[in-house]
Image (tube, rainbow, N blue to C red):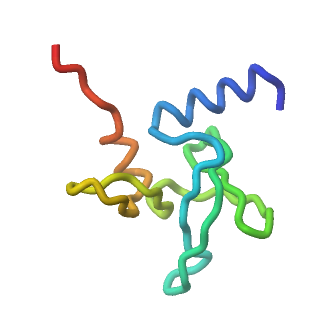
């Protein structure tokens, strides 16, 4: 990727509250165990490309991926990316 493409990918991820290399968890099939991957970029169709522990790339819908965010008591919990994309931004008070 070129520098401009990398900057655009980073900006797109930042708008939904993610950053490249951030750990996410996913399931390869329903009912299987959770696996950890690393965020890479957002595709034009809205899916998120990640790399699994074996280095394989896959693009998955945001509603099937989870990322760790602080819960109501401050302890990190897993939340779906579709939820984080709506609630991640800190609003200004004034």
> From the image, which quarter does the N terminus lie in?
top right
Q: Quadrant of the C terminus?
A: top left
**Image location of residue 29, percent across then percent down:** 58, 80
Side of 88 where 92 appears, left or right: left
Q: Residue at x 25, y 26 (%)?
A: 91
**In the rendered image, the vertical position of residue 28 relative to residue 43, given as above or below:** below
**Position of 22 compared to 86: left or right?**
right
Q: Quadrant of residue 3?
A: top right
Q: Is residue 47 above or below residue 37?
A: above
Position of 91 relative to 68 (above/below): above
Seen in the picture, residue 28 relative to 9 is either above or below; the reply is below
Q: Quadrant of residue 52?
A: bottom right
Q: Residue at 75% of width from left, 58% of height from top?
A: 57
Q: Where does residue 60 sit, x and y in percent of width and height? A: 59, 58
The image quadrant that residue 73 belongs to is bottom left
Image side of residue 25 versus residue 20, left or right? left
Q: Residue furthest left?
A: 94
Question: Who's the residue at 30% across and 41% down the image?
Answer: 87
Report the side of 50 relative to 71 (left or right). right
> 62 or 22: which is nearer to us?
22
In x, y percent, where is residue 63? 44, 58
């Amino acid at each position: 990727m070129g520098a401009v493409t990398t900057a655009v990918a980073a900006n797109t991820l930042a708008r939904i509250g993610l950053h490249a290399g951030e750990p996410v968890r996913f399931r390869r099939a329903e009912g299987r165990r959770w696996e950890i991957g690393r965020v890479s970029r957002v595709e034009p169709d809205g899916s998120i490309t990640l790399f699994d522990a074996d280095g394989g790339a896959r693009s998955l819908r945001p509603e099937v991926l989870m990322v760790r965010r602080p819960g109501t008591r401050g302890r990190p919990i897993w939340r779906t990316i579709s939820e984080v994309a709506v609630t991640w931004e800190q609003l200004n008070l004034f």
